[in-house]
Each structure stands twice: as C-alpha cells, then as structure tokens.
Image (cartoon, rainbow, N blue to C red):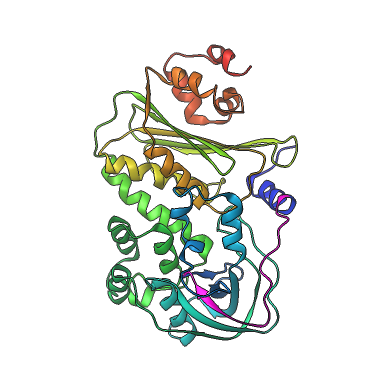
Amino acid sequence: MIIGKGAYLKQLTAATVQMKSEMVGKEMEGSSPPSVFVGSWNYPDVFAGPMIAPVHGDTAVMDMPESWITNNTTQEEIIGYRLNLVRGKHPVNATALDTSFVEKLQAIALADGSIESEAAFLNAPQGFSFSEEHTPFGPSAPLERFEIESGTWNRQMEKVYYDTDFLSADAVCDLHRQGVPVSSIQKAFSVGTMGRGTRRRLVPTRWSITACDTMIADRLLLDVKKSPVIDTCRLHEFSSLHNNYAVLLLPTSWQYEWTEAFLHVLGNEEYVFSDFEEHTKKTGYSPVGGCYYACKMAVLETLAQQHEQAGAIILREALPGYVPMGVFNVRENVRCAMHQPAQEFEDLRSALAHLSQKFTLPLKRFIDEGTLLHRNLRERQSTLRDFSSLVI
C-alpha cells in the first residue's frame, strides 16, 4: 500500500509514543527555558502561550536542540526534557500584538536566559504532543492567569525588535550570521518580534521553523552559487538517535535532493520518501515536510563557510527505536555530519559502494526513489546493473 509521509508519521507517533508527561495541578510555578508555542489551527485565530518547566532555575537545556546532538544527549533524555514542559494556551489573533499577554510571550522569546513564571490553568494540564515538525512537549491546558518576572533580553534580538524598518528576512539572516541559535531565532520570529512594524504577526511555531530555515538557506545559497565548484566527490556521515545520515557532495553546480527511509520502526515497513530541486529554487511546499528545508539550510551553512559550491544528495534512514521529535533532529544531525572529516572518492559509484557497507537499506532503493541520484549516475555512464553488488 502506498502511503504519504504525513500519514505514516501519524501512525508512527500513535504506535511508538507510550510515555507519561509531567503531572501538574491547576496552578504551577517554574521557569520557561525560555520557550513559547503558537498553534496553527484556525489561523489567524490561534492558541498561543508559554511552555514552563515545574522547576526553578536554569532550564535552557530543555529547549536548546543545538546542544543535544553535540553533547550526546540520549533520545530518552531529550524526551524527558520535553515532556516536563507544560504548555499554557490562550486564544489570540495573529495580528493583535499590542496586548499584555503577547508582550509577555515576546519577553520570554527574547530573554537571555530562563524566566521565572507563574500560571493558573482552567483545568489540570493533560496529554503530550509529538511531531516530525516541532519538538515534543508535555501536558497543555487553557490559561486563566499568567505572570512572569522581568529579565534581560538577548542584545542582538533586542536590537532587531526595536528596529521596525528591518525586513524580517534580513533580521533572521543577520541574527544567524551573528551566531544566535536557530531555535532562538525561530521562537522570536514566531511571536512577532521581527519585520516592519505594521506587518508583524504571530506565526505558528511549525510555520516559523520552516520559514526561518528557508530564509537562511536562500541567503546562504546566493553566496554558494558564486563560489567555485568542488573538484571531487565527497561523503560526510553521521549517526545518532536511531538515524543514519550520509551527505554526498558532488562536483557540480548547486542541486539538492533529500531522500529518507523509515525501516521497520513499526514492524516490517520500508517506506522511502524523496524530493529535490535543481539549480533554481523549488516552488511550492515540499511533500516531505520541514525536514527538506532544515537539511538544505544545514548543508548550505557549511558550504558557505567554506566558500564552496557542490551538488548535495542527502540520504537518511530511520531505524527501529526512532521517534518523531521535530525537524531539529535532521538539522542538527546534518550539521554534525557536515562537521565530520569528508571522505573523498573518485566518483559517485565508489562513494555509494562504500556507503552500502554502512546503511541498512540496499542502496538501489535510494537510487530508484531519488531523481537526482539516479540522474547523476546515468549521466556518468553508469547503469543500475553496476549496482548489483549494492543490493545483496
């Protein structure tokens, strides 16, 4: 049976996530990492609010995905962090930024550290949320009252907040250039702290993640396309959180393909999803979701830093034990892959032959599903028969 990625991930989440979130009452005190969440249902009338841990002090690690992979944080530890975050919900209109409630959310998102908070809920928070798009969080409930203590703001983001003539894309890319974590930029963008004054809006968290990845990638690509093309085939590899990643860099002008396989996570299934773009920018939203844009940004980030241009074909396989935890999983793992020493190969076939010894899924499946991978092999006068050794 053919199944789309979105439908598969819903099945996967329902079947694999059997965990308990934090139990809290109708009132709580604690620290926001800082963290906020803006829903997308019924936009522009949405539910927005803080995410608070029922502990006091520095809780930043709970919402700092940039630190998780590099510090070898386990999947269980990450899920533990996230399920301890309680989401408060309050109905707001995306254009109504001049309310005390939205101002509190902006203060949280711009904060330079954890913010002490108090919340009263209409009922005891329940449930949890897992998604391939956003990081998980614990129980949620409508807010009756919400207060925060004052705190200092991140200086770079504070400057952007007060510059109401600064285009949002320029603000996002400038903050990235200054080294502000992407996750922090995304949160600040989602609560309407960037862009020209009258055009500022709340942006649902899921949308803001892809929007920031896209804006940064588009700006980086301008520089990459001006850079010289690499002269050999390179392979970067990385594995973590029940995923294997392979970044193939080809000696061509910019082209990009993302292909991911989900192998026996639920049972005997083997699903492969793929999307690509050539030298010109892709139009329309990718059917494989936010991972496409997060991976693209991570690859371009390193190419731009190294002043190089290449074609990029990225292969990912998710293995038993994998749990959807948001696109950070792709972005940060691909970043780590790009920081690993590259192995150089005489051609694409040699790189795939090497990779076939590491990956679980036969490489022929990736070749069959991928457009650019298949095309680059064909253009180099290879045939699929050459890859019989890869499918054993």
Q: Which image quarter: residue 306?
A: top left
Residues 286 and 329: in front is 329
Q: Is residue 359 above or below residue 212?
A: above
Residues 160 and 44: in front is 160
Q: Is residue 356 above or below residue 80?
A: above
Does the magenta run of residues contain 338? no
Residue 290: percent from left, percent from top: 52, 51
User: Where does the magenta region start and end?
Assistant: 16-33
Q: For the point 29% across and 43% down, which residue is it?
A: 304
Does the magenta run of residues contain 21? yes
Residue 166: percent from left, percent from top: 28, 69
Q: Tell whether 105 sits left or right of 157.
A: right
Residues 105 and 256: in front is 105
Q: For the point 73% across and 55% down, which residue is it?
A: 18
Residue 238: percent from left, percent from top: 48, 36
Q: Tell whether 344 sits left or right of 369.
A: left
Query: Can residue 161 be seen?
Result: yes
